[in-house]
Amino acid sequence: MIKRMVIMLLATGAVFGGLYGFQTFKAGIIQKVMAGMANPPQTVSTAAASVSDWQSQLEAVGTLKAVNGADLALQVAGIVEEKSFESGDTVVAGQTLLKLSAEDDIAKLAALQATADNYAISLRRAQEQQKVSAVSQATVDSDAASLKNAKALVDQQQAIVDQKTLRAPFAGRLGIRSVDLGQYLTAGTTIVTLQALDTLYVDLYLPQQVLSQIKVGQDVTTTVDSFPGKTFPGKISAINSKVDSTSRNVQIRATMNNPDGILLPGMFGRVKIAVGSSQKFITLPQTSIVYNPYGDSVFIVDQNGQEGTKNGVVRQSFVKTGATRGDNVAIVDGVKEGEQVVTAGQIKLRNGTPVIIDNSHVPAAENAPEIKDQ
C-alpha cells in the first residue's frame, strides 16, 4: 500500500515537473523572439532646425476694386440707332459709344432754336427803335425776356438730345456689351461696364487692435490665386474714419498699380502688411509637429556622435510653436538650432526607437509656396 502511494506521488510530481519545465521553456522562447523584434528601425525623413529672419506681418483677404469703374446707362428711354464699340474695347474719355434714335427731339430742337433766333431779331429791332424813341423801354425788356426764355428752352431740348448719346466718362476697358441695334432701352438699363484698370484699390478689413500698427503710406503686398508666384506691391492710401460697431473691424484701402491690366475688379487677394522689425526664429517644416491635446511635440534624431550617417535614435521633445509662414512654423521653445527633426514617419515612433534617415523624396519647405503647373 505504501509502495503504491509512493509510486503515485512520484508520477504526479513528474507530470507537474514536466508541465512547469515546458511553460518555462515556452516563456524563454517567447522572450527571445520578442527581444529580437523590439524597436526595429523605422525609416523617416528629417530636416535640420534652422534660424530664419521673419518680418512680422498682418494678413487679410481683400477685394480688388477699380479706381474708376461704372456700369454705363442712359437717363432716357429709346431705340438703339447706333453703336460704336465692341465688347472688350479700350476707350478714351469722351468717346461716343452708343446713340438712341432722336429725330423727333432734334426736330423740336430746331424749332425752338428758330423761335429763339426770331426773338433775337425782334430784340435787336426794338433796341434800334428805342434809340429814336420809337418804342418804349418796356417793349425792349419784354423782347429780352422772351429771348432769354427761348434760349432756356433750346438748352433744355439740347440736354434731352445729348442724353440720347452715351459717351465714355473716363478712359478704360469695356466689358461685355448687353444691347443690340434696334433694341428698345428703358431709362437706366445697363449697356456695358467700363473699368479703368491701370490702378486698382484693394479693400480689406483688420481688427481694431492693430490700428496702432498701420498708417497711410505703409507698404503692402498682394497675391491672387489667378497668378501664382506673382506679387503685386502697393501702399495703404486710406483708413476708414470709423470702426464697424458689429465686427469691430476697420476698413483699410490700399492702392496698387496694374500696368498690364491683368488684375480685374472683383478678384479677391491675400494682402500682407509688414509691421515692426524682423525677428529671428528657429523654424521647422509644419509636418514635423505632432499635435496632441496634452501638448505639441517633435521627434529629434540623436546620432550618438555619428553625425553624417543615416542612422540614429529618436527622442520626443515637447515644443511651443509660434507664427507660421507657408510650409514652416516658428519654434519658440523645445528645439535647438541644427538638431535633426523627423518630418515624416512619426506615427510608428516612440522614445528610443532606432531610425534610418531617407530624405531622397522630401520636397523643400518654403515660406511662400507656389502652385506650379504640371
Image (cartoon, rainbow, N blue to C red):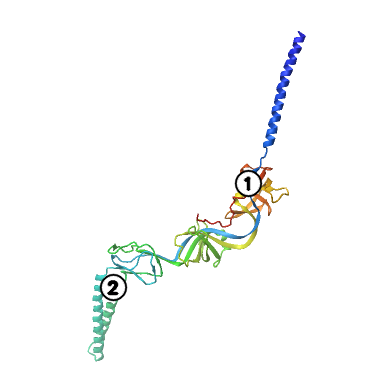
The residue lying toward the viewer, choosing from 254 and 231, is: 231
SS type, badge 2 = helix
Which percent across, then down, holds residue 369?
A: 55, 56
23 over 210 or under it: above or below: above
Please tell me in which quadrant of the rendered image residue 279 appears: bottom right
Q: Amino acid at mark 1?
A: Val
Find out whether the residues at labels 1 and 2 contact each other: C-beta distance under 8 Å: no
- Residue located beneath label 1 in the image: 44
SS type, badge 1 = strand
Which percent across, then down, holds residue 28?
A: 71, 30
122 lies left or right of 325: left
* Cα separation between marks 1 and 2: 84 Å
- Residue located beneath label 2 in the image: 157
Give the residue drawn at x 25%, y 84%: 123
Q: How many marks?
A: 2
Give the residue drawn at x 55%, y 58%: 59
The residue lying toward the viewer, choosing from 176 and 60, is: 176
Q: Is residue 19 visible?
A: yes
Q: Amino acid at mark 2?
A: Gln
